[in-house]
Image (tube, rainbow, N blue to C red):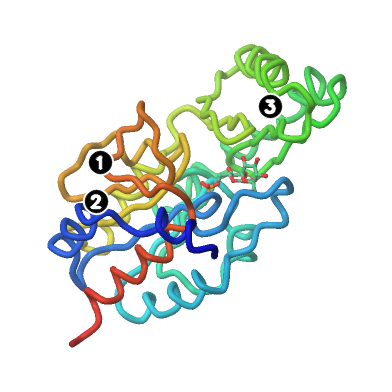
Amino acid sequence: MRPDEKAVTLLSPAIRKDLRSFIDQRTLFAFDLDGTLAPITSDPSNIVIAPEISVRMSRLCNLARIAVLTGRGLEDARSHLTFNPHYLIGNHGAEGLPELDGKREVFLNLCHDWEHHVRQLVVNSLSGITVENKGETLSIHYRNHPDHQTASSLILRAASSLRPSPRIIHGKCVVNLVPAGAPNKGDALLSTMKQGNFEKALFVGDDETDEDVFRLRNQCIFGIRVGEKESSFARYFLSSQLGVVDLLDEVIRTLEPM
Ligand SMILES: O=P(O)(O)OC[C@H]1O[C@H](O[C@H]2O[C@H](CO)[C@@H](O)[C@H](O)[C@H]2O)[C@H](O)[C@@H](O)[C@@H]1O
């Protein structure tokens, strides 16, 4: 890391102070994966959690309870993790919660049908568009199409013609289609807190799907967004993904016995 990068990746004194007085060993520490634990890359299969983050996450797993809440499918997410979280929730909240067992089949069938239609409507006619069918949800990526605006409008038009209508979540060069009524990341975090009797949680995320947690505006959740955004509901921000290292250091320092 260059010295000028280091300056902007340090936590602000305000977050540091609030964080120290909020967290303790009984807090659930929840993290998003893409854009938070791993930097964004052009190929979704090539993400890498940096060694500086891996080593700190493994340490944190021994000090407290850790959850990863990701838009990826569970098995895919697991294949990229370098530590073993105590809770792993996939598909934006639609996979991995105990209360979802009976709904899996319905979600899989819906996504199978949507994938078929989306391929016919956009993928076959536009270059650089890929559909990631993750079982319970679909992600339609347009990062590799030369005109992002045109690609996203065409994908949105196709998505809004699907029946039954999906919930549409925008993301980084991606449009996510989620079955209506499936839990979102906010629901998933609250459910995991209840399941494990956690009174408080810290959550770090970077994207629209993570706003479902920030939007709760729950005093028991310390929400931190990676990357400032005016319209975000998050209370705290890190200027970039590199700031996660300093955040983890602060958490570990606060939790470790003196
Ligand atoms: O909730 P997350 O863990 O942040 O997952 C959100 C989506 O992440 C992946 O797509 C995004 O990251 C890719 C790799 O950096 C990038 O190439 C892509 O443009 C991003 O949209 C993943 O592929 C999706 O399934 C997740 O929903």
Q: How many marks?
A: 3
Closer-to-camera residue (163/10) = 10
Using the numbered discs, state the Cα–Cα distance from disc 2 to disc 1 in whole angstroms. Answer: 8 Å
User: Residue at the location (28% across, 59% down)?
Assistant: 195
| Circle 3 SS class | helix
Within 10 Å of the Cα at label 3, are there few (<14), some (14-19), or many (20+) other Cα atoms?
A: many
The residue that mark 1 highlights is 235
Q: Closer to the observer: label 2 or label 1?
A: 1
Q: Closer to the observer: label 3 or label 1?
A: 1
The residue that mark 3 highlights is 114
Point out the residue furthest to the left here.
21
- Tell whether circle 1 marks a residue whose Cβ is less than 8 angstroms from ligand 1: no
Q: Which mark is residue 222?
A: 2
Quadrant in which residue 9 is drawn: bottom left
Q: Residue 99 vs residue 92: left or right? A: left
Q: Residue 104 vs residue 225: left or right? A: right
Using the numbered discs, state the Cα–Cα distance from disc 3 to disc 1 in whole angstroms. Answer: 35 Å
**Kind of residue at badge 3:** Trp
User: Residue at the location (37% across, 65% down)?
Assistant: 246
Please state the horizontal and vertical placement of residue 140, each as a whole percent of the image. 68, 32
User: Residue at the location (58% across, 36% down)?
Assistant: 172
Which callout, 3 or 2, points at the residue further toward the start of the chain?
3
Using the numbered discs, state the Cα–Cα distance from disc 3 to disc 2 in whole angstroms. Answer: 36 Å
Q: Report ligand 1 position as a quadrant.
A: top right
Which callout, 3 or 1, points at the residue further toward the start of the chain?
3
| Circle 1 SS class | loop
**Kind of residue at badge 2:** Phe
User: Residue at the location (36% across, 26% down)?
Assistant: 231
